Image: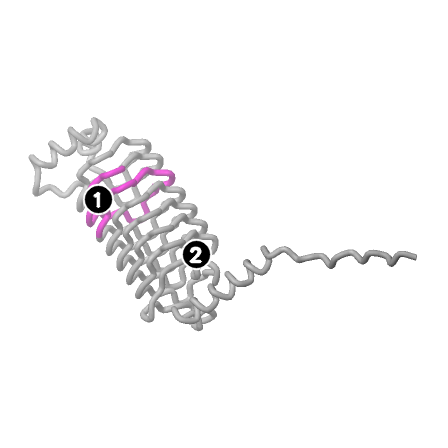
Amino acid sequence: MADRRQVEILEDGPESWNTWRRRNRTVVPDLSEANLKEYKLRGANLAKSNIASADLRHANASGANLREADLREASLQRAKLTEAKLTNANLREASLHRINAARVDLTGATLVEANLLRAHLKDAKLLRANLSQANLLRTNSSGANLRGANLTQSQLVGANLKNANLSGADLRGALVERRQLLTAKIDAKTRLPEEHKWMTPQSRRAVKATSKRTKASKRTPTRKPAAKVPASS
C-alpha cells in the first residue's frame, strides 16, 4: 500500500515532490495502489518508485522521470507520457490504452502482456524493450525505434509501423500483416513470423517495385480507338 504522506506531497504538485525527493535521496517512494487519477506529474522525479497497481488514468506525466519505476499492473489509460523517461521501467500487464506517449523513452522497459491498444507511440524509443504478448492493436508506432525489441506473440494488426525501425527485433508468433512490414525497416537480423519469413530486405524491395509498377499502370489512361468515318457514297 502507498505511503499516505508521500501521496499528499505528490498531490501538491511536481515542484513540492521534487524538493522532497532531493531532501530524501535514500527513500524509495511507495505509491503502490494509490489513486493518482488526473494528477499533474509533469516533470516529476518518480525514478525507481513503487507505483505498482496505481491508478494513473488521465494523469499528465509528460517529461516525468520514471526510470526503473515499478508500474506493474498500473492503470494509465489516456495518460500523457510525452517525452517521459521510462528506461528499464517495469510495465508488465499495465493498462496503457490510448496513452499519448510521443517520443517517450522506453528503452529496455518490460511491457510483457501490457495493453497498448490505440496508444500514440510516434517516434518512441523502444530499443530492446520486452513487448512479448503485448496488445499493440491500432497503435500509432510510426517512426518508433524498436531495434532489438522482443515482440514475440504480440498483436500488431492495424498498427501504423511506417518508418518504424524493426532491425534485429523478434516478431516470431506476432500477428502482423505483410503491408505493415512493407512500411517498416527490417534487416537480416529481424526475426519475422513464420508466414512472413520470406520477406527478406531484398524480396521486400522487389514487392515494393512491383506494387509501384502496378499503381502506375492503373493511372495510365486507356486510349479509346478512333471512331471510323463512314465512307462517302
Q: Position of residue 97 (x, y in %)?
A: 40, 44
Other-residue count near label 1 (Cα within 10 Å), few / some / many at <14 / 14–19 / ≥20 = many
Residue 5 visible, this angle: yes
Quarter residue 61 falls in: top left
Residue 135 visible, this angle: no
Q: Amino acid at mark 1?
A: Leu
Residue at the extreme right of the image, as rendered:
233
Q: Is residue 93 above or below residue 188?
A: above
Q: Residue at x 23, y 39 (%)?
A: 63
Q: Nearer the viewer, residue 185 or 152?
A: 185
Q: Nearer the viewer, residue 124 or 72?
A: 124
Q: Residue at x 11, y 41 (%)?
A: 27
Number of marks in picture:
2
Which segment did they paint magenta? 62-87
Q: Are marks 2 and 1 in contact (CB under 8 Å)?
A: no
- For the C terminus, the image quarter is bottom right
Q: Position of residue 104 (x, y in %)?
A: 28, 46
Dominant secondary structure of the residues highlighted in magenta in the image: loop
Q: Which mark is residue 156?
A: 2
Please say whether residue 63 is one of the residues in the magenta stretch: yes
Q: Amino acid at mark 2?
A: Leu
Q: Position of residue 222 (x, y in %)?
A: 66, 57
- The residue singled out by tag 1 in the image is 66
Instruction: Kindly state the secondary structure of the residue where label 2 is placed.
Output: loop
Quarter residue 111 falls in: bottom left
Q: Is residue 156 above or below residue 41?
A: below
